[in-house]
Image (spheres, rainbow, N blue to C red):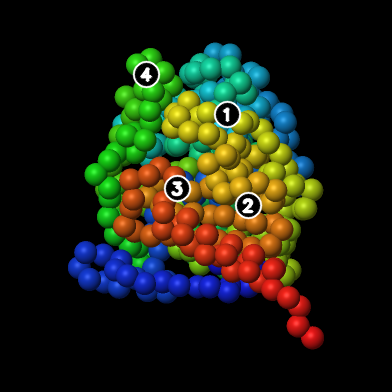
Amino acid sequence: MTVDGEFVVDLWAGLAASDGRPWEQDTIVNVYSSTKTMASLCVLMLADRGKLDLDAPVATYWPEFARNGKGGVLVSHVMAHSAGLPGFDPPLETTDLYDWKKCCDNLAAQAPWWQPGAAVAYHALTQGYLQGELVRRVDGRTLGTFFREEVASPIGADFHIGLDAAHDHRVAELVPPQELLSDAYVGEPGSVGARMAAGGPRLDATEPATRAWRAAEIPAGNGHGNARSMGRIHSVLACGGALGDVRLLSEKTLARILEVQIDGDDLVTNAPARFGMGYGLPTKLMPPLLADRRVFFWAGWGGSLAFIDLDARMSITYAMNRMSPELMGDARALGIATAAYAVLFTAAAAPATS
């Protein structure tokens, strides 16, 4: 947990592997969809630099993407999970995720599953390829390289999208839930959720143990880091886009994260969803105390969390290796966030002392 860019809580404990290896200060782990916050940050940085227009069609930068009725899909639709491309069609196998061109060609060729911008459905894996190809087309670097050179290195954050083998000894062993990722997708036969559940790839949380998964760039789900590195990165956003001599975003672009892009029941998870520009915004399922605060967040399968409160200049982050079955909303992470707000509001209510 950070406030004003400084760590006020920094905890680690437990076992990193089944052989009894302890979780150390520099242990890192696959945080699944909390990686999406990093990918969205990269796109926002390019927009901030005037290299990409969030309101422009994706095909402006990726001409082949306009095929099959996708000429009107906007970058903002991609950022808000409303582009109509939540899955691969035809379906892909897990090993196909390591072939960047194959994944992007699949997405460029298919037709949207609904009118883009008209509905929201969680783009669990596809969002990262969509965002990553935009970064590559606009900047020339892959998203993982852009992130390393423009975000992680300048602020000294131990987070990786595409992990070098030299770090393998630090990676915690995930303890998977019994459920597949696709078990979180719900819906009647023929629905978007059912189509997602049947279409694959069918991930069972064992793939991150492979070198192929770690080395690949899967910007929607294979980032490796820990709560400290996640907190370090998000503390920059919590402090208005800059920390010390490093500025990642202008306050004007940062404010766009809070602009509601889509609000409705998610067609994949069947839960309320509300997205700003690249991040989740509070829904009716969240505590009422957050309703009037400038907060945004996202979480990863198994329990990881990245949460930013601009009003408190606070970031709350959590990473773990023992996975819970929930796609989002792990009780451990929520308990930490609740404790943080209890302290925050208690301090705010305390009488001033002379």
Q: For the residue carrying disc 3, how many other residues have a C-alpha within 10 Å: few (<14), some (14-19), or many (20+)? A: some
Among the 4 quarters of the image, the one containing residue 235: bottom right
Q: Quadrant of the C terminus?
A: bottom right
Among the 4 quarters of the image, the one containing residue 21: bottom left
Q: Are marks 4 and 1 in contact (CB under 8 Å)?
A: no
Q: CA distance from mark 4 to mark 1?
A: 18 Å
Q: CA distance from mark 3 to mark 4?
A: 23 Å
**Amino acid type of the residue that numbered disc 3 sits on in the rendered structure:** Gly
Residue at 59% x, 62% y is 341
Q: Quadrant of the N terminus?
A: bottom right
Numbered disc 3: secondary structure: loop
Tell which circle, 2 or 1, labels the residue nearer the N-terminal end.
1
Q: Are marks 3 and 4 in contact (CB under 8 Å)?
A: no
| The label number, if any, that marks residue 264 in the structure image | 1
Q: From the image, tell me which residue sits under label 3.
A: 329
Q: CA distance from mark 2 to mark 1?
A: 20 Å
Q: From the image, tell me which residue sits under label 2.
A: 289
Of residue 225 and residue 235, the one placed in the foreground of this image is 235
Among the 4 quarters of the image, the one containing residue 245: bottom right
Numbered disc 1: secondary structure: strand
**Amino acid type of the residue that numbered disc 1 sits on in the rendered structure:** Gly
Q: In front of the other: label 4 or label 2?
A: 2
